Image: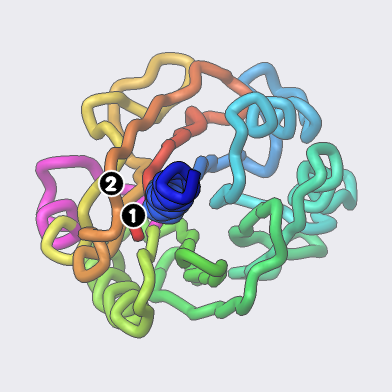
Amino acid sequence: MRKYYILLLCALLSGSATMAGKPKTINLSTYNIRHGQGMDGQLAFHRIGNILKEAGAQVVAVQEVDSVTKRTDGRYGLREIGKSIGMKDIYAPAIDFQGGKYGIGILCQKKPRSVRRIPLPGREESRMLLVAEFRDYVVACTHLSLTEEDRLASLTIIAREASRWDKPFFLMGDLNDEPGSKFYYELTQHFRVLSNTKEPTFPSDAPNVCIDYVAVYRSQAHRVGEASSRVGKEQTSDHCPLHATIQLLK
């Protein structure tokens, strides 16, 4: 009998160790929402919320977000999307626009431990990096400049920020450049791209170029296991939504 209990205890301890070492799976999404206007010209934030809910997104990087501007009829789209699917909203305005603000944001199921807003260069308009820290990882959202020089300068700032963290740092957003470019090469020196760059993300009605990405900072990339991504076919913006499922290793 005693031998039976010893064997049972060993089995339970072994099972607990296995569970403790089991990878954690997270669902991340990035979406340039064009202030909520679809290719049909309709402003409908609930449609974007439905897409994110169906994807099971836990954290979403959102670009081209208006707050109380004329073209959104004075509405704050990020909060409307978040409320519709029970997610918290974090905003980083980049410029004043049409009586309100225009910038980027993050939607998340859980409240972040900390948030940082970091200005980035952009000669055609100011740009931002929005960083949200969670227990096991950090997510950064951005929408980079149309100018290559500014994108490269932004990458230096982003990499410096990523190096501050001792947990996986995920960069997500509309980087306004495609694989094979000088910028993309520099990006891959600092980050491991997790999304499938062979799947185009823009324009949504006839996708032919990849400019939206999910990537992890290389110094913590060893803590990321299997990763898969898919590009949505919805046309609720001029960009396609990009969804990634990622394993976090202990």
Mark 1, residue position: 249
Q: Is residue 196 left or right of residue 74?
A: left
**Other residues around mark 2 within 10 Å, as few (<14) / some (14–19) / many (≥20):** some
Q: Is residue 131 left or right of residue 160?
A: right
Look at label 1 and name its amino acid.
Answer: Leu
Residue interval drawn in magenta: 171-187
| Residue 114 in the image, given as x and y percentages of width and height | 61, 79
Pointers 2 and 1 in contact (C-beta within 8 Å): yes
Residue most extreme to the right: 74
User: Which image quarter holds the C terminus?
Assistant: bottom left
**Would residue 50 be visible to someone looking at this image?**
yes
Q: Is residue 45 left or right of residue 147?
A: right
Q: Using the image as rendered, state which of residue 143 and residue 52 is in the foreground.
A: 52
Residue 182 painted magenta: yes
Q: Is residue 95 left or right of residue 118?
A: right
| Residue 38 in the image, given as x and y percentages of width and height | 66, 25
Mark 2, residue position: 225
Label 2 sits on a secondary structure element that is strand
Residue 161 painted magenta: no
